[in-house]
Every structure is written in C-alpha cells, then in structure tokens.
C-alpha cells in the first residue's frame, strides 16, 4: 500500500457537508507547494497547523488532510 494525502477545503466549522476535495498528493511538501498557489492568504501558521493537526483553524475557508493507503497498482499516472 502507498500512503497519499487527500486535501479538502471546508467551512469555518469544519462541517462534514462543506468538505470539497482539492487534490490528492504523494507527500506533504508537494501539497503545500500547490496550496500556496491555490490560496494566497495561506500563512506559515496555517502550514504548521496542517503539519501537526492536519487541519487549519480560525479561517472562513479551512483545509483538512486525510491520510489514505491506496494500492499503487490502481494509481493512474
């Protein structure tokens, strides 16, 4: 199995119905690089929160990370 990161955006309350998938990434560094282009207001504190608790806080639009194990044979390249 291969670990991937599923990045989602959600509302300020992290309500389940607000989750929208942004992308699937092979590692944290690639995810942050993409997210910095996607959101110009992303702070170093936000990145630290993603790294430690896998979600941002105190924003109108938050981000959450879910770690998934997938079969590498099923990954389309």
Image: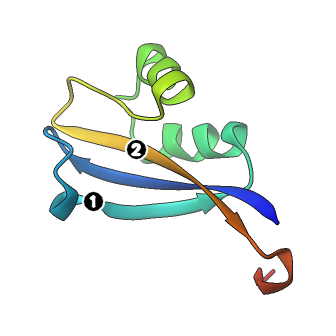
Q: Give residue 4's quadrant in the image.
A: bottom right
Number of residues whose C-alpha sits closer than 10 Å to that of mark 1, classed few (under 14), some (14–19) or many (20 or more)? some
Query: Where residue 70 sits in the image (x, y, percent)?
Result: 72, 70
- The residue beneath circle 2 is 64
Q: Are discs 1 and 2 less than 8 Å apart at CB?
A: yes
Viewer-nearest residue: 24 or 14: 14
Residue ID at (52%, 62%):
23
SS for tag 1?
loop
Q: Mark on residue 19?
A: 1
Residue ID at (49%, 30%):
50
Left or right, 20 with reference to 3: left
For the N terminus, the quadrant is: bottom right
Vertical placement of residue 35 versus 18, above or below:
above
Viewer-nearest residue: 54 or 7: 54
For the C terminus, the quadrant is: bottom right
Quick one: label 1 or label 2, which is nearer the N terminus? 1
Report, in whole angstroms, how far the alpha carbon at label 1 lies from the one at label 2. 9 Å
Left or right, 75 with reference to 44: right
Taking the view exactly as shown, the residue that stands out farthest to the top is: 45
- The structure's colour scheme is rainbow
Q: Give residue 56's quadrant in the image.
A: top left
Vertical placement of residue 22 versus 45, above or below:
below
Q: Mark on residue 61?
A: none
């Amino acid at each position: 199995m291969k670990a991937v990161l599923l990045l989602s955006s959600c509302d300020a309350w992290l309500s389940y119905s607000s989750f929208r998938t942004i992308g699937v990434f092979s590692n944290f560094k690639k995810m942050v690089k993409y997210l910095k282009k996607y959101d110009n207001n992303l702070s170093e504190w936000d990145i630290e929160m993603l790294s430690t608790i896998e979600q941002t806080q105190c924003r109108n639009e938050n981000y959450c990370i879910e770690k998934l194990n997938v079969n590498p044979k099923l990954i389309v390249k």
